Image: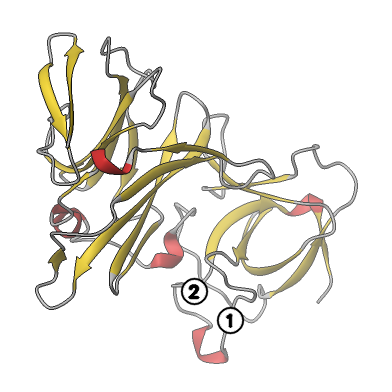
Amino acid sequence: MYCSPLSIAAVFTVACWTSAATAQSVCGGEVLFQCATDNADFREQITVCAQDRSYVLTRHALSSGDMYYDTPLTAEANTTWFRWSEGDQVQVEIGFWSTDLAEPVTLHVGLPWDDMNETVADTGDHNMWLQSPHWRARVDQTLCASGTVYADPEALWSAQHARGPIGAFFSQNEIIPRIDTVGMARVSDTEVTPEGLPVYSSARPAAATPIWWMLQPGETVDIIDRADDFVAVAIPTNGLTDCFLRPEDLGKPYTGPCATGWVDSAHLQRTQ
């Protein structure tokens, strides 16, 4: 076990970090995950809490209590990117939006899992890290020291009581594919910024509307809905290579398997 005195401004006294550590509460609600980053010269603490129907992520310096984000990262449980897969080890991913940095931040957690009792196992590897931003060619990752990871994921489920379909990831608008809207398009080679063509979370984006993804020139995407000058596109993620749409799916709200978002149709060339 590794123990060190931590001076956190008016918050902490002493914390002893192990894989079974007791979480320190730095946000309201129930603590889901917590860790200290693996930079020995500048340790930070990352905490994720469940608050009502949202998840909240805070990050601060262990030595001073100074916050890394001006405001906590938030994820609305019923619309955010969320993945849970289990076996001998549970893999959890939760998508947050950073208002300060105007970019998405994905939390990754890996936990040893006791499948018989449906709970975190007493022994095994605990891993946790942040990935940001996930749509750029260069991916920044903030890693946690494995011996500092605390996890109590039970409160994940109550927060998602009213969770919508996984296809709502990225899109704040309901998407309904119809025979006259479904098709394919190619991203224009011109009039696209060096970072690509933004995919917005809303069909009527404003300056503050989250950009969850960037399409690159020449890329082909599936179109599934239209709203004025914007079209809803389906984006294969999580190892998918195609976005499957069957005839019986037409006329119903899109529920995946692909993520969705909204693109300015002026930068797309219909191919079919």
Element class at badge 1: loop
What percent of the width, then of the height, locates residue 237? 56, 64
Q: Residue drawn 34% across and 49% down?
A: 127
- Identity of the amino acid at label 2? Pro
User: Residue farthest to the front?
Assistant: 1
- Identity of the amino acid at label 1? Phe
Image quarter in which the C terminus is found: bottom right
Q: Nearer the viewer, residue 110 or 270?
A: 110
- Distance, label 2 to label 1, CA atoms, is 7 Å
Name the residue carrying label 2.
257
Is residue 207 shown above or below 109?
above
Is residue 241 shown above or below 99?
below
Identify the mark nearer the N-term, 2 or 1: 1
Q: Nearer the viewer, residue 7 or 107?
A: 7
Element class at badge 2: loop
Asked if labels 1 and 2 touch by Cβ distance under 8 angstroms, the answer is: yes
Name the residue carrying label 1.
244
22 left or right of 230 in image: left
What percent of the width, then of the height, locates residue 209? 52, 37
